[in-house]
Image (cartoon, rainbow, N blue to C red):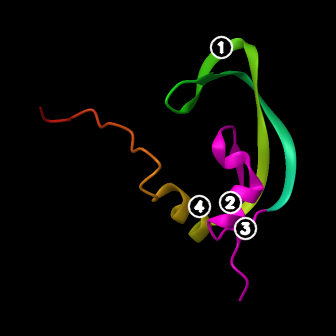
Amino acid sequence: MTPRRIEVFFYGLFMDADLLRTKGAHPENLRPACVPGFALRIGQRATLLQNSGARAHGIVMELTHVEIEQLYSEASVPKRPTQNTQQ
């Protein structure tokens, strides 16, 4: 059985399909896309910020759930801090 593919919008490093292939993913159906009402901010990570007059440009591609999980579980992808971080 062929795994179901999910459309994913990428706006940072992962929008490079060749990079994803080196990580074992097999992106399909790549196409340019944009999200109105958001601006791209580049810092330590690429981040989308709400901005009513902006448009964030990126790429939509299809990946499987397993491929998405593998990409975001890598040590190189920083985890978001939680609200209840102990000091």
Distance from label 1 to label 4 (Cα)? 27 Å
Viewer-side label of 2, 4 = 2
Residue 32 location (% of width, % of height): 86, 41
- Report the residue marked by disc 4: 68
- Report the residue marked by disc 2: 20
As drawn, the residue found furthest toward the left would be: 87
Q: In this view, does 37 lie to the left or right of 87?
A: right
Span highlighted in magenta in the image: 1-27
Distance from label 3 to label 1 (Cα)? 30 Å
Distance from label 2 to label 4 (Cα)? 10 Å
Residue nearest the observer in this picture, 4 or 72: 72
Q: Above or below — where is 5 with respect to 77?
A: below
- Report the residue marked by disc 3: 5
Query: What residue do we see at 66% from left, 48% from top?
Result: 14
Residue 57 location (% of width, % of height): 78, 31
Viewer-side label of 2, 1 = 2
Q: Which amino acid does label 3 sit on?
A: Arg
State which tag comes first along the sequence, 3 or 1.
3
Packing grade of label 4 (10 A; few <14, some 14-19, many >=20) is some
Look at the numbered disc 2 and give the secondary structure of its residue.
helix
As drawn, the residue found furthest toward the bottom would be: 1
